Image (tube, helix red, strand yellow):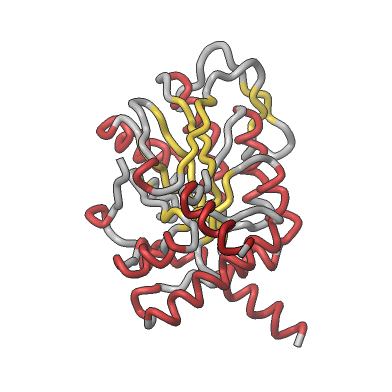
């Protein structure tokens, strides 16, 4: 049984590494809600040259934005949210975390439930580092190919798995392949989760150079001026390009926004009515 589980986990990791290149929607489907290193920073490489250690002070961190629905997720000019799908995975997610820490910023990690179960210590570290935690279904299923009940079961199973392994509330969600429906969105909102859209697709899942991923991302950002950036913490090229991307964002005056979920409170009159019923 243990051997079967290990083999299944390996197969899932391989599938996630390839899923974006084979199933990702084209640019027209992007849902919208809304390398130059600065001279004062010098790169001091550690043993792993994929993760340069930045020296000096950074001014990339922006405000914390509290949202209870997608309507609240409104970014100002030159504000970005860094989001990472499909992890966690050792050797990659941990490098992304180290780089974010070096720049003093946080990301939004949309975890696949099965991946969180495979790597619980790493999943918990993502949360303990102060990053936003979201879910991305249990096994990265294309929900549009499932019945409504089966799709919601997949969503709920993923949410519960990520909650258990991170020890954190899971209040954000992203549809695999950005494949959704109005009914699913409404049902997810009813579970007090915000369905995260995408403004800028880095396409870091393409087999291109890290420099190409950085340039593609910045080109899109220059056109929009702000937005939620989609990346994947399961790819080596993402960790390799991230220091350059963050350096460019900082040099051009962008700010990285940290997301936080704000629970909605029941109207006072409803609470009073409930209390009245309980005391009768």
Q: In the picture, which quadrant includes the N terminus?
A: bottom right
Looking at the picture, tell me which residue is in the foreground, 134 or 47: 134
Q: Residue furthest bottom?
A: 1
Residue 235 visible in image: no
Identity of the residue drawn at 50% across and 75% down = 154
Q: Quadrant of residue 164?
A: bottom right
Q: Where residue 117 sits: x, y (%)?
A: 68, 67
Left or right of 137: which side holds 178?
left
Query: How many tags in the picture?
Result: 0
Looking at the picture, tell me which residue is in the foreground, 163 or 279: 279
Q: Where residue 214 sits: x, y (%)?
A: 42, 37
Q: Residue furthest front?
A: 280
203 shown above or below 245: below
120 shown above or below 1: above
Q: Where residue 137 sits: x, y (%)?
A: 51, 67
Q: Where residue 89 sits: x, y (%)?
A: 64, 58
Identity of the residue drawn at 47% across and 57% down = 173
Left or right of 20: which side holds 155?
right
217 shown above or below 280: above
Q: Residue furthest top?
A: 40
Identity of the residue drawn at 27% across and 58% down = 26
Residue 31 visible in image: yes
Left or right of 218: which side holds 14?
right
Looking at the picture, tell me which residue is in the foreground, 198 or 159: 159
56 shown above or below 181: above
Q: Residue furthest left?
A: 28
Q: In the picture, which quadrant includes the C terminus?
A: bottom right
Identity of the residue drawn at 42% across and 24% down = 254
């Amino acid at each position: 049984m243990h051997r079967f589980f290990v083999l299944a986990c390996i197969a899932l990791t391989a599938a996630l590494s390839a899923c974006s290149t084979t199933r990702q929607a084209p640019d027209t489907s992007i849902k919208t809600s809304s390398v130059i290193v600065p001279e004062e920073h010098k790169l001091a490489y550690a043993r792993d040259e994929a993760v340069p250690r930045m020296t000096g002070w950074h001014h990339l961190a922006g405000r914390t934005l509290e949202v209870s629905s997608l309507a609240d997720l409104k970014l100002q000019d030159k504000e970005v949210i860094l989001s990472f799908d499909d992890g966690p995975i050792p050797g990659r997610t941990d490098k992304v975390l180290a780089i974010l820490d070096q720049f003093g910023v946080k990301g939004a990690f949309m975890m696949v439930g099965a991946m969180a179960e495979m790597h619980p210590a790493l999943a918990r570290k993502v949360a303990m580092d102060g990053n936003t935690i979201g879910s991305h279904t249990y096994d990265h299923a294309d929900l549009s190919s499932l019945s409504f009940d089966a799709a919601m079961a997949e969503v709920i199973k993923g949410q519960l798995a990520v909650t258990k392994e991170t020890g954190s509330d899971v209040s954000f969600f992203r549809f695999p392949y950005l494949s959704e429906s109005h009914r699913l969105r409404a049902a997810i909102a009813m579970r007090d989760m915000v369905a995260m859209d995408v403004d800028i697709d880095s396409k870091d899942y393409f087999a291109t150079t890290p420099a190409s991923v950085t340039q593609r991302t910045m080109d899109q950002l220059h056109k929009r001026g702000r937005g939620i950036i989609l990346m994947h913490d399961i790819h080596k090229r993402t960790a390799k390009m991230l220091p350059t991307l963050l350096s460019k964002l900082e040099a051009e005056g962008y700010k990285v926004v940290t997301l936080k979920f704000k629970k909605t409170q029941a109207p006072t009159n409803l609470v009073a009515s409930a209390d009245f019923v309980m005391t009768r």
